[in-house]
């Protein structure tokens, strides 16, 4: 696997800041043999599609509202990615629910970045600014980001990497969100992708060990 190219699909629902971090990392040669070959958006008109276009990456819109059920949507997603020979799936602010068809088609090959230190502030309903609002309400002194392997249970998959970020007095959810993106998400997501592409992520008993560490 280490010699051949690892085709990466990035799934997005919004602006695509984490997609941009991955694109920038790839340009710097920091994704190993990984190459972003497909961007899939869950709705039309999101800025992430512009980012793909500006960088010559093929993109597809699979609009959730065009499919009757989660199962239909998941099936279309799997077929689209299999046709594109995708090896690794990265959820980068992808807010659409998918089912086990996707996990079964890409076992231990789906990465997600979550803007908190799992198991804190995660699970159903914890996305976007809600995560940071909850962290500030709790008065935590550190928060951060987690990259984990996606499993059917929300935010419960094996943890690959985590990075802590200081919470400062006077933080708003927006300020904390930005700091966690800049100091954690945009660093550990490309790093986790590189580890995957280098064949260094080993999953056993719902835990990740990184080979060579």
Image: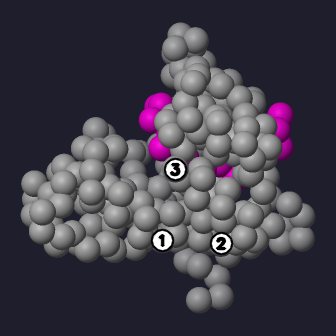
Report the residue at 32% width, 55% height from top: 177
Element type at marker 1?
Answer: strand
Which quarter of the picture shows residue 198? bottom right
Mark 1 and mark 2 lie on one chain; the one further toward the N terminus is: 1
Which residue is tagged 2? 195
- The quadrant the N terminus occupies is bottom right
Mark 2 closeness class: few <14, some 14–19, many ≥20 residues within 10 Å: some
Which quarter of the picture shows residue 76? top right
Q: Nearer the viewer, residue 3 or 186?
A: 186
Which numbered disc, 2 or 3, marks the residue closer to the eye? 3
Find residue 203 and report its horizontal and vertical position in percent.
58, 67
Q: Nearer the viewer, residue 108 or 135?
A: 135
Residue 17: which disc? 3
Residue 6: which disc? none
Mark 3 closeness class: few <14, some 14–19, many ≥20 residues within 10 Å: some
Mark 2 and mark 3 lie on one chain; the one further toward the N terminus is: 3
Report the residue at 26% width, 74% height from top: 166
Report the residue at 78% width, 57% height from top: 35
Alpha carbons under labels 2 and 3: distance apart: 21 Å
Element type at marker 2?
Answer: helix
Which numbered disc, 3 or 1, marks the residue closer to the eye? 3
Contact check, label 3 and label 1, Cβ < 8 Å? no
Magenta region includes residue 149: no
Magenta region includes residue 90: yes
Find residue 110 and report its horizontal and vertical position in percent.
60, 51
Mark yes or no: residue 105 visible: no
Find residue 82 and report its horizontal and vertical position in percent.
78, 37
Report the residue at 54% width, 20% height from top: 64
Which residue is tagged 1? 161
**Magenta region, residue range:** 81-97
Contact check, label 2 and label 3, Cβ < 8 Å? no
Contact check, label 1 and label 2, Cβ < 8 Å? yes
């Amino acid at each position: 696997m280490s010699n051949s190219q690892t085709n990466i699909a990035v799934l997005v629902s919004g602006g695509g800041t984490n997609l941009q971090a991955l694109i920038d990392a790839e340009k710097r040669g920091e994704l190993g043999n990984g190459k972003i070959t497909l961007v899939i958006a869950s709705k039309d008109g999101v800025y992430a599609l512009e980012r793909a276009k500006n960088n010559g990456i093929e993109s597809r819109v699979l609009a959730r509202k065009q499919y009757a059920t989660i199962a239909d949507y998941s099936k279309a997603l799997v077929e689209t990615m299999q046709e594109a020979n995708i090896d690794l799936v990265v959820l980068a602010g992808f807010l659409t629910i998918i089912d086990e068809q996707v996990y079964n088609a890409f076992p231990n090959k789906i990465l997600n970045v979550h803007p908190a230190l799992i198991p804190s502030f995660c699970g159903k309903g914890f996305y976007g600014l809600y995560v940071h609002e909850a962290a500030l309400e709790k008065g935590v002194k550190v928060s951060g980001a987690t990259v984990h392997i996606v499993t059917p249970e929300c935010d419960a998959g094996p943890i690959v990497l985590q990075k802590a970020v200081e919470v400062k007095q006077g933080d708003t959810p927006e300020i904390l969100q930005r700091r966690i993106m800049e100091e954690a998400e945009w660093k550990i997501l490309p790093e986790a992708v590189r580890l995957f592409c280098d064949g260094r992520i080993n999953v056993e008993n719902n835990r990740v060990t990184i080979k060579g560490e």
